[in-house]
């Protein structure tokens, strides 16, 4: 369990936008996870921050940043512009490689809700080098055209009582072409995993997945 890590506030360049974020990297980290928040959320998301803390305890870094500026987020349709969100995620991934704290580290994506679609779309790019993806209560159906191109190990986590989203994830799961993929259902959990122990289970599943494919697994040949 990592107890010491470096944390810094950052501005991620994405075209003309500058996106606020926080980069945290434990000593000796081999990997970093980039968080893609869902509709209307931000780097302040309590659920994603909770998951990030558990990932840090596993010795893996975390980048939480806003995919939209305040002005962009005020336009509701931008929250569902998956292509734009994916471009922002790709920009953050490229920027991260140039940061001394994270250069050379394996990279993974953790997406929630619409952010999951953005993560899958970004990871499906031919030049993407994403070692693992985890989706929490995601909308992979919004990246339907990209699913067959996703090769990174992918974990879909859905609440057992999140019936509509669970159905969407089951259908999307069959279209993902990754050799390593799993669909995990958290019993009794609804969309936001607010039930006792539900978010803890999400964090455990995500940490295990990232440890398996970003830390313990041999480096992938892209």
Image: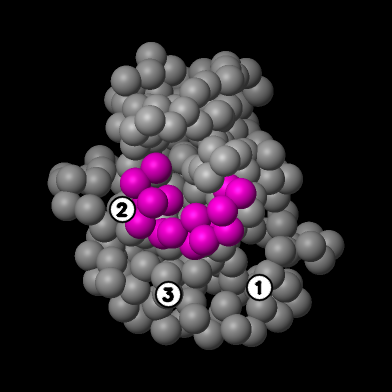
Picture coordinates of residue 16, whole percent (x, y):
38, 30
Q: In this view, does 183 lie above or below 204?
A: below
Which residue is label 3 attached to?
141
Which residue is label 1 attached to?
159
Q: Is residue 134 above or below residue 218?
A: below
Q: Is residue 38 above or below residue 12?
A: below
* SS class, disc 2: helix
**Residue 3 figure quarter:** top right
Q: Distance between the residues labelled 1 and 3?
A: 16 Å
Dot 2 or dot 1: first in sequence order is: 2
Picture coordinates of residue 107, whole percent (x, y):
37, 39
Dot 3 or dot 2: first in sequence order is: 2
- Disc count in the image? 3
Residue found 33% across the figure and 42% down from its top: 90
* SS class, disc 1: strand
Residue found 57% across the figure and 18% down from its top: 8
Contact between labelled residues 3 and 1, with CB atoms less than 8 Å apart: no
Residue 116 in view of the camera:
no
Magenta-tinted stretch: 73-88
Image quarter where the N terminus lies is top right
Q: How crowded is mark 1: few (under 14 residues within 10 Å), some or many (20 or more)?
A: many
* SS class, disc 3: helix
Q: Residues within 10 Å of mark 3 (few under 14, many from 20)?
A: many
Contact between labelled residues 2 and 3, with CB atoms less than 8 Å apart: no
Which residue is label 2 attached to?
123
For residue 82, side relative to residue 220 (left or right): right
């Amino acid at each position: 369990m990592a107890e010491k890590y470096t944390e810094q506030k950052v501005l991620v360049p994405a075209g003309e936008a500058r996106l606020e974020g926080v980069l945290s990297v434990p000593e000796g980290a081999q990997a970093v996870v980039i968080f893609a928040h869902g509709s209307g959320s931000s780097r302040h998301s309590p659920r994603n921050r909770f998951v990030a803390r558990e990932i840090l305890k596993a010795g893996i870094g975390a980048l939480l940043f806003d995919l939209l500026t305040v002005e962009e987020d005020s336009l509701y349709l931008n929250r569902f512009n998956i292509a734009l969100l994916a471009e922002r995620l790709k920009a953050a991934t490229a920027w991260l490689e140039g940061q001394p704290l994270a250069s050379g580290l394996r990279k993974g994506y953790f997406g929630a809700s619409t952010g999951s679609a953005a993560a899958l779309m970004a990871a499906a790019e031919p030049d993407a080098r994403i070692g693992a993806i985890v989706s929490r209560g995601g909308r992979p159906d919004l990246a339907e055209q990209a699913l067959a191109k996703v090769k990174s190990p992918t974990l879909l986590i859905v609440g057992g009582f999140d019936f509509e989203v669970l159905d969407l994830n089951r259908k999307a799961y069959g279209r993902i072409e990754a050799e390593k993929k799993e669909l995990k259902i958290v019993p009794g959990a609804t969309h936001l995993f607010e039930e006792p122990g539900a978010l803890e289970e999400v964090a455990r599943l995500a940490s295990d997945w990232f440890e398996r494919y970003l830390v313990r697994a041999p480096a992938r040949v892209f």
